Amino acid sequence: MQKPTPDHFPCGALVTNSSRVITYVNSYFTTELLWIPGELIGKSTDVIFTQSSKIFFQTYLIPTLLHEKTCEEMQLIIFNAKGVRIPVTVNAHYSSDGCIYWSFFNASKRDQLYDELIKTRETLEEQAEALKLLASTDELTELLNRREMSYRGSLVLEQAARSQQSVSLLMFDIDYFKKINDAFGHVEGDRVLQELGQKLKAFCRQTDLVARVGGEEFLILLPDTDKTDTLLFCQRLHQLIATVMVDNKPLTVSIGVSIYENKISFTDFYAQADKAVYQAKNLGRNRTELYQTQ
Ligand SMILES: Nc1nc2c(ncn2[C@@H]2O[C@H](COP(=O)(O)OP(=O)(O)OP(=O)(O)O)[C@@H](O)[C@H]2O)c(=O)[nH]1
């Protein structure tokens, strides 16, 4: 069996003295990097390094080696004999015999790996963002869903309790929506819900929370809004909703309003608005009723 030598290793092996003069290269430099040993032996390592690697090599690597005796996983770039840049991972050991023993591992796939890692991370971030959106919004109208409204609404109430701001909650339910579905089909019913969703989004402020919480039930939470402004908002809301036409007739809704006065949970606040909607339906629909404490 042939005696193993450094020529058998799948990496570049190079020996220099402490002044960076090359005294030995294995055959990897010939077969993989296309150098003729005569072009390297007796020359400074500057021959093989790119400008930036040369600076790093001289100012950091050699001083560290002389001091620490060893350096690992240095990311450098060398030239092959044709002038092609090759990223390498370099390990080195400064031996007591005064020689520095170097190994050069080809790291051409390193950049490709980083690119792939970055792409994977971006894809994961996009997917996480999409999942977050799916979990918090109603698919048909793209408004908030019930769970997200309840979560964000609770935060708004906590903030209102601290700053003693007025908050109001509107719940509304489309009038006779079943008739729309029965007469024109579910596709038309869905179109009405979508159009309403778009109009609500455009109509409300960025700080308002707008949600679809049931088939034809919606919630709007108005932070920092008192009773007078809320009732004005409701008037305008009726006008807005009347611009959604079904069979040439304006859509109408029944609105229930609850005004946040004493500290109350979001669930109870919601229940109050729900009671007020019930009242509005009983009193003939297409109107707004305020929740009254008995
Ligand atoms: N197209 C469509 N219809 C839905 C959706 N979710 C619920 N609905 C329908 O909404 C209708 C609600 O009917 P009801 O609860 O009787 O209420 P209404 O007809 O609006 O009557 P009032 O509320 O009393 O004025 C039902 O026909 C449901 O099938 C949906 O996502 N799309």
Image (cartoon, rainbow, N blue to C red):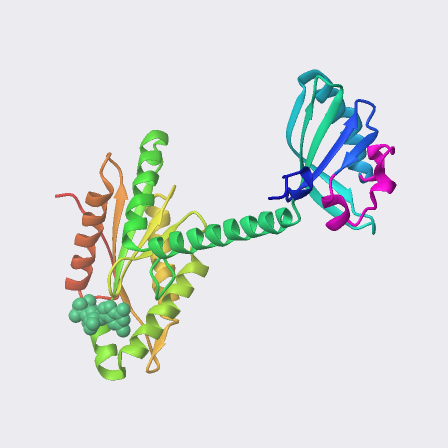
Measured as percent of width and height from the top left, residue 228 is found at 34, 47
The quarter of the displayed image where residue 238 is located:
bottom left
Q: Is residue 124 left or right of 248 when viewed as pictured?
A: right
User: Which residue corresponds to the image point at 31% horizontal and 38% vertical from the top-left?
Assistant: 157
Tell which of 274 and 213 is nearer to you. 213
In the image, is residue 253 above or below residue 256? Answer: below
Tell which of 261 and 36 is nearer to you. 36
Can residue 145 be seen? yes
Q: Quadrant of the N terminus?
A: top right
Which range is magenta? 26-48
User: Which residue corresponds to the image point at 38% horizontal and 64% vertical from the top-left?
Assistant: 197
Residue 71 inside the magenta-drawn segment: no
Tell which of 61 and 2 is nearer to you. 2
Can residue 175 be seen? no
Residue that extends furthest to the front in the rendered view of this protein: 1
Quadrant of picture, ligand 1: bottom left
